[in-house]
Image: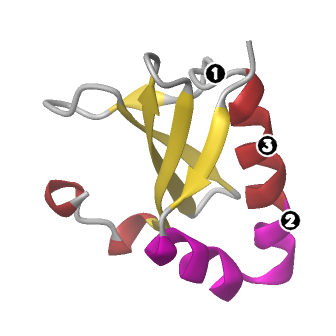
Amino acid sequence: MSYQIEITPAARREIRALPGYVRSQAIQLIEELSRDPRPARAIELRDRENILRIWLAGRWRIIYEVDDELVIVLILRVRRKEDIDYRSV
């Protein structure tokens, strides 16, 4: 089963602002999430059910939500690790 990918406006702006090599990796990883929304390297955030993070290019993280009922992966943020406040995700 393939999940539909949706990207919040904030995450879309963050993706556009990424350096080129990181942006291409982000796009590829997001496409892969449509086939497997919970890859082995994804980690569910503490106290945030169905909100996961995955490393991107060593310094950035993609924060996303998986809705199994609607079969949607919602990309919430794409930021450097030090710029993420998980309480506001």
Q: Report the residue marked by disc 3.
A: 31
Q: Residue furthest bottom?
A: 17
Left or right: residue 61 compared with residue 32: left
Residue holding disc 1: 39
Q: Quadrant location of residue 84? A: bottom left
Q: Position of residue 83 (x, y in %)?
A: 35, 75
Q: Is residue 88 magenta?
A: no
| Viewer-nearest of discs 3 and 1 | 3
Mark 3 surroundings within 10 Å by alpha-carbon count, few (fewer than 14), some (14 through 19), many (20 or more) = some
As drawn, 84 above or below 58: below
Q: CA distance from mark 3 to mark 2?
A: 11 Å
Q: Determine whether the residue tagged by mark 2 lies in a helix, strand or loop.
A: helix
Q: Amino acid at mark 2?
A: Ser
Q: Residue at x 23, y 55 (%)?
A: 86
Look at 69% across and 21% down and name the residue there: 36
Q: To which residue does mark 2 refer?
A: 24
Q: Spatial distance from mark 3 to mark 1, Cα to Cα? A: 12 Å
The tag earlier along the polypeptide, 3 or 2, is: 2
Q: In what element is the residue under mark 1?
A: loop
Q: What amino acid does circle 1 point to?
A: Pro
Q: Of discs 3 and 2, which sits in the foreground? A: 3
Residue drawn at x 59%, y 74% as measured from the top left: 12
Q: Specify which label sits upstream in the sequence, 2 or 1.
A: 2
C-alpha distance separating marks 2 and 1 = 19 Å
Residue 30, which numbered label? none
